[in-house]
Image (tube, coloured by chain):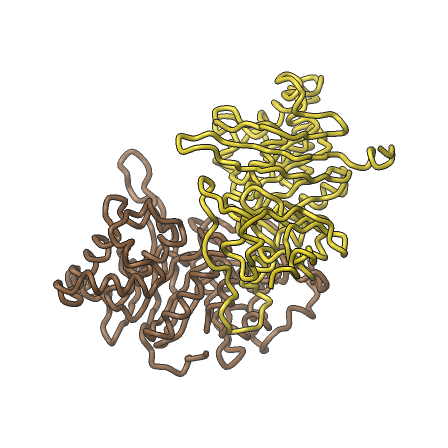
Amino acid sequence: MNELVEKDVILEVNNLRTSFYTDEGEVKAVNGISFSIKEGSTLGIVGESGSGKSITSLSILQLFAGTTGKIIDGEILFKGENLLEKTHKEMMKLRGNSISMIFQEPMTSLNPTMTCGEQIAETIRTHQKLSKTETKLKAIEMLRLVGIPEPEKRIKLFPYQLSGGMRQRVMIAIALSCNPDLLIADEPTTALDVTIQAQILELIKNLQKELGTSLIMITHDLGVIAEMCDFVAVMYCGKIIEYTDIRTLFNSPKHPYTVGLLNSVPSHEMDSDEDLKIISGTVPSPYDLPTGCLFSPRCPHAKAVCHESMPELRVHEDGGLVSCFIYEHDKWQEER
Amino acid sequence: MTMTDGKVLLEVNNLKQYFPIKGGVLGRTVNQVKAVDDISFVIHEGETLSIVGESGCGKSTTGRSIMRLEKPTGGQIIYNGEDLFALSKKEMRRRRGDIQIIFQDPYASLNPRRTVFQTIDEAMTIQKVGDKSNRRQDIGELLKTVGIGEHQMNLYPHQFSGGQRQRIGIARALSVRPKLIICDEAVSALDVSIQAQVLNLLKDLQRRFKLTYIFISHDLGVVRHISDRIIVMYLGKIMEISDQKSLFNNPGHPYTYALLSSIPSTKMDEKKARVILHGDVPSPVNPPTGCPFHTRCPYVFDQCVSEKPVFYQIGENQSAACHLLKNGKVEFKNMKSPG
């Protein structure tokens, strides 16, 4: 492979499959997905509940302790090294250091019995050899970086003494304390009010610019995607069904599901009194996935071929990837 | 769509809802949270009035107070000429046949040990609606109206998806033939594709049964889609009351303007300048003096700290409480923030 390309891509995921094993059978939560992220850029993963977007992020860090989840196939290349071949100890070194994560609920992901300062210090201590005073100074510096006023006083506070927005800032401070190359943000603003969401998104954007961190943004909110991302992967039932740059996604979406999703969002900028154009039906049960294209039972354009075989993710003429027979002209024209 | 000229259905006058904070060894009331602090508005027959605001602004408490699910601290709620707060418990129970509520979490608000039939039957029995011998048929019809199969009548809540459960919640509210339905974050817990289905259903039911909605939500996109008029609340007070068009095209209060500009836009080619508010919503236990928004307002000046603003009428159907408006409407788009 070309050396330049190698250097440019920080994370490459190839044919990742993650399954959960329950009493009712196997759930293919992530079912053969591939994507890559260039250094310093932002990839959005968008989808509804159960689409596999969060499991994708947990797979990258292999955070499946205490669950029946298992990665059964694929590779995750981080700076050219396959994370799936790493030992437990090597992964421990990586988490929070080169790759870190921000979760949705800052209250449940912070330790309620430790002060904010101690929690930031814990991460720094695990990965860096600094003296006690240096660690404390670094913790204060991190809090200042994420816009917490009077950080010298705030490091002594417990999470319950902070507001939701402030807690999320502490989470971001912990995640960025070792200057990671890749930050995974799983619904980081979903639990926050809009005015606080705007603050946190602005903060993440500015820090990313300043530190050059690459970012994976996982969300169900298309507005957040539009605000933050360079590229987007749209997931449905464990598969990527469209993968394109942000402009193409919003200006000319290709997959019928993406189109439906965009139409379903009542925008505060919309001017009509008309009913919303809806996607009929619901997401199929993971134990009973349809044959053929996974979206075919809900798709307004579905033909016989859609119910029979699964379309592959193919390059569309405008550069994006889409998995839909509508764009495979030979197969689509034959039917009629 | 605008039905603002319709008859007044419900009138809220100086509603106050305070919650005590107990403390000390004796459990005395040491302070109080002013969840709703002296608000007044009317709702007309057949319209959808939305209440928006951030967490803790008092929008849900307002809804619950109208249903008298909380003991009111002060004020009046006039429905059909009578004050709901003056009614006995028994009389109020009867009145709840006219006013129904749909909650956010459809799983938590349905009894997991009752079938759909039992749940709806209970509501109809309490309100003495319809003939008992026709119950199965009536409930079957009702379920069809909200898009649930008649054959699913004997299933339990856990056997339905989130969207279906919310449809059952709607069917229960409809079963007693109400005039006014309070939707408290009724679509917030649903995925967008399901949310769109339920929103369309609510609009359709409104047309068919001439319903009036009070729609409580934090999602301005949803609110724009469904409302005729909108109330913006902040820290227990009303900041702005406006018809839908004026509010979104030309917000009257700086808080409304900031709220609208905080929403991430999906329009790729028109990136607008944003107003990002600093800081958090202050504690309702100890609200700021003067205008409650002055601690975060980009246009704050001396008067805002010392004096509570009154409402200024700035359009036919638009009024807002802000000192900036005393000489008429202000275009925030063209205004430079002094800070």
Above or below — where is B282 with respect to A135? below
Which is more toward the observer, A226 or A212?
Answer: A226
Location of residue A115 in the rendering, given as x and y in whole percent from the top left corner: 54, 28
Which is more toward the observer, A192 or A67?
Answer: A67
Which quarter of the figure has residue B67?
A: bottom left
Which is more toward the observer, B283 or B233?
Answer: B233
Looking at the image, residue B86 sits to the left or right of residue A60; the answer is left
Kindly indicate which chain is depicted in yellow in the rendered structure. Answer: A
Above or below — where is A270 with respect to B89? below
Whether residue B78 is visible here, answered yes or no, is yes
Q: Residue at x 19, y 56 (%)?
A: B122
Location of residue A195 in the rendering, given as x and y in whole percent from the top left corner: 57, 53
Location of residue A59 in the rendering, given as x and y in whole percent from the top left corner: 60, 31
Looking at the image, residue B280 sits to the left or right of residue A95; the answer is left
Looking at the image, residue B57 sits to the left or right of residue A91; the answer is left
Q: Residue at x 17, y 67 (%)?
A: B130
Whether residue B275 is visible here, answered yes or no, is no
Above or below — where is A13 with respect to B6? above
Which quarter of the figure has residue A249?
A: bottom right
Q: Residue at x 26, y 47 (%)?
A: B111
Q: Residue at x 83, y 33 (%)?
A: A7
Q: Quadrant of the C terminus of chain B?
A: bottom right
Which is more toward the observer, A86 or B33?
Answer: A86
Q: How many marks?
A: 0
Location of residue A104 in the rendering, given as x and y in whole percent from the top left corner: 54, 40
Looking at the image, residue B265 sits to the left or right of residue B245; the answer is right
Which quarter of the figure has residue A270?
A: bottom right
Kindly indicate which chain is depicted in brown in the rendered structure. Answer: B
